[in-house]
Image (cartoon, rainbow, N blue to C red):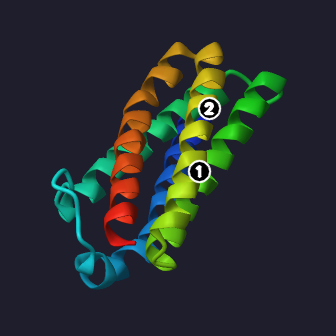
Amino acid sequence: MAFTSDVARLIISVVVCLGTGFIGSLFTRPAIQTWYATLQKPSFTPPSWLFGPVWTVLYILMGIAAFLVWRKGADSKPVQIALLVFIFQLLCNALWSILFFGLRSPIAGLIDIALLWVLIVATMLLFIRLSTAAGILLIPYLLWVSYASVLNYSLWKINR
């Protein structure tokens, strides 16, 4: 019974994270070949095709991390707080695509991604107290968002 429950929680956790990416992609995809293609980009801008695979892996890692925390006990106050902060950072994650690509606003994206970075760090700190592995699984996400923050800033600065 516990195994079935764990499998269900893992699937839900990963699907919720991938769903966040899907929502973001609804705003990102239409802008890639149009608006984004017209922006001047810094030399360290990766090719557009790289973002999809990287984000897919990151969302899966985030889902696994959330699962590892969730399985510590949904009735536990520390687990509830950690997952609530995790949900806030997921919302902030999706909002970035809406602001940056949907509204075509690098400055709004920059403000959001700064908040996202803080929420990721808070999530990591809360997760690591409950599951070392969960905290470690978020390191690639923090690193990528750190890089994306610098890229977002550069895009805003070059194109304002």
At label 2, the amino acid type is Thr
Asked if the residue at tag 2 contacts the one at tag 1, i.e. Cβ–Cβ closer than 8 Å, the answer is: no
Q: Is residue 127 above or below residue 58?
A: above
Number of marks drawn: 2
Whether 91 is drawn above or below 33: the answer is: above
The disc placed on residue 90 is: 1
Q: Position of residue 58 (x, y in %)?
A: 38, 43
For the view shown, which residue lies furthest in the bottom direction?
34
- At x 62%, y 39%, the residue is 119
Where's the N terminus, which quadrant? top right
Front in this rendered view, residue 134 or 97? 97
Residue at screen point 66% across, 30% down: 70
Give the number of the disc on residue 123: 2
Q: Secondary structure at mark 2?
A: helix
Which residue is nearer to you in this view: 10 or 43? Answer: 43
Residue 117 percent coordinates (x, y): 53, 41
Task: Quarter of the image for the C terminus: give it.
Answer: bottom left
Residue 126: x and y, percent?
A: 66, 23
Residue 1 appears in the picture as rendered: no
In the rendered view, tell whether residue 78 sits above or below residue 95: above
Residue 2 numbered mark, or none: none
Which residue does the image show at 42% across and 44% down from the upper left? 145
